[in-house]
Image (cartoon, rainbow, N blue to C red):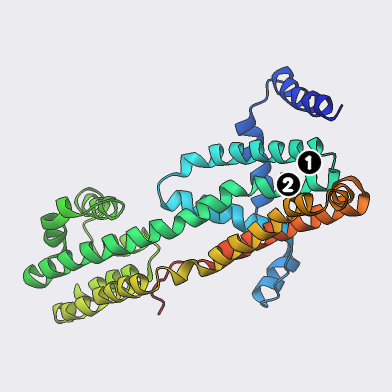
């Protein structure tokens, strides 16, 4: 009977989409936009200015969605946001269906909400790899450009000499800089200032500001190499602490695995206790609470796992 109910639910959802000619991509993105919309009243703005922080699941969800969109934009994959949202909706339906399948309405709600966050967590984790690759490429690119600029004292010539040796995603930034100077504005200072906003990296911004200062005083060119060496320090620290960076995530996975295996172990140890766990109201609530704890642990582990960056 349960299988028939779940099948009817799935067919009903699919039928509504066809009946009203709805698109999962459009509906999901509209829902995500409504949640992530950052409209604030005067009280909220005053509290934010006064450093009064209100914590809540909706605010955390909005921040996660906004972070995901920002990461996709920075990595040049902004067009994937609609697909991420649609995939999230699909996992939500899967979670709800699994909960209905085991006749646990509480678990159905928790699984639906938790599994819908999986695509956003994946993008959040992928940011770590992107930033590591960005730091490595920035170190190489800024090093060769600084060497050429120290010799020629011409930043445009220095970038052009090394442009074909620079790899994405840094290459496009310097290519836009050359295009900006040649065809949009002849002011090198303005072009450097605009370029500094293209990459969210404190060392890169400092390097650009030092270059701007060098346009008025060429003797300041010797300050560029120490700035680039900061990226080398970040690479060295990252190499030394590569495994420790993921300790929170690793511990979270171990603990979550133990929690998830609890019902299975109970089934092997004592079938009567297992039936009480999955068949009574208290047991169903217990399973839902365990699922909530697992998803909270996953979110905390991902939030604590951050790439190493140089901060001034």
- The image shows residue 25 at horizontal and vertical percentages of 60, 33
Using residue 312 as the reference point, say whether residue 145 is left or right of it. Answer: left
Residue 241, compared with residue 25, is above or below; it is below
Give the image quarter of residue 177: bottom left
**Is residue 251 in sight in this rendering?**
yes
Residue 307 position within the rendered picture, expressed as x and y whole percent measured from the top left: 44, 67
Residue at figure coordinates x 52%, y 66% from the top left: 305
Asked if residue 278 lies left or right of residue 54, the reply is right
Give the residue furthest to the left: 151
Along the line of sight, the residue nearer the viewer: 185 or 153: 153
Question: Alpha carbon of mark 1 to alpha carbon of mark 2: how far?
Answer: 7 Å
Q: In x, y percent, where is residue 13? A: 75, 26
Q: Which residue is mark 2?
A: 111
For the residue pair 272 and 231, the one nearer the viewer reads as 272
Relative placement, left or right, of 79 versus 88 is left
Disc 2 crowd rating (10 Å Cα; few below 14, some 14-19, many 20+) is many
The residue that appears at 70% across and 59% down in the rendered structure is 259
Neighbour tally class for label 1: few under 14, some 14-19, many 20 plus, Cα within 10 Å: many
Q: Position of residue 69 (x, y in %)?
A: 53, 50
Q: Is residue 40 visible?
A: no
Q: Quadrant of residue 156?
A: bottom left
Please state the total of marks drawn on the protein image.
2
Q: Which quadrant holds residue 91?
A: top right
Question: Cβ–Cβ below 8 Å for labels 1 and 2?
Answer: yes
- Look at the picture and state if 284 lies above or below 55: above
Query: What residue is at 40 percent from the left and 80 percent from the top?
Result: 312
Q: To which residue does mark 1 refer?
A: 99
Q: Nearer the viewer, residue 257 or 167?
A: 257
Position of the N terminus, as image quadrant, is top right
């Amino acid at each position: 009977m349960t299988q028939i109910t779940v099948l009817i639910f799935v067919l009903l959802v699919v039928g509504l989409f066809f009946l009203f000619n709805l698109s999962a991509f459009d509906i999901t993105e509209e829902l995500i936009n409504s949640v992530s919309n950052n409209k604030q009243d005067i009280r909220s703005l005053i509290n934010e200015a006064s450093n009064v922080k209100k914590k809540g699941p909706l605010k955390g969800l909005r921040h996660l969605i906004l972070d995901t969109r920002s990461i996709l934009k920075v990595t040049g994959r902004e067009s994937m946001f609609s697909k991420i949202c649609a995939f999230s909706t699909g996992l939500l339906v899967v979670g709800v269906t699994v909960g209905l399948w085991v006749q646990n309405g509480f678990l159905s709600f928790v699984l639906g909400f938790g599994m819908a966050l999986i695509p956003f967590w994946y993008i959040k984790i992928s940011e770590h790899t992107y930033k590591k690759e960005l730091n490595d490429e920035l170190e190489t690119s800024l090093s060769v450009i600084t060497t050429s600029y120290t010799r020629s004292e011409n930043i445009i010539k220095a970038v052009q000499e090394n442009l074909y040796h620079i790899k994405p995603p840094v290459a496009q930034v310097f290519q836009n800089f050359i295009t900006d100077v040649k065809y949009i504005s002849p002011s090198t200072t303005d072009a450097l200032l605009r370029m500094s906003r293209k990459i969210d990296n404190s060392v890169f911004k400092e390097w650009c500001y030092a270059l701007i200062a060098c346009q008025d005083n060429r003797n300041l060119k010797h300050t560029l190499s120490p700035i680039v060496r900061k990226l080398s320090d970040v690479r060295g620290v990252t190499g030394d602490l590569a495994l420790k960076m993921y300790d929170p995530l690793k511990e979270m996975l171990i603990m979550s695995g133990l929690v998830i295996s609890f019902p299975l172990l109970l089934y092997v140890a004592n079938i009567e206790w297992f039936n009480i766990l999955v068949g009574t109201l208290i047991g169903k609530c217990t399973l839902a609470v365990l699922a909530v704890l697992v998803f909270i642990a996953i979110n905390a582990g991902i939030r604590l796992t951050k790439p190493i960056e140089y901060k001034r």
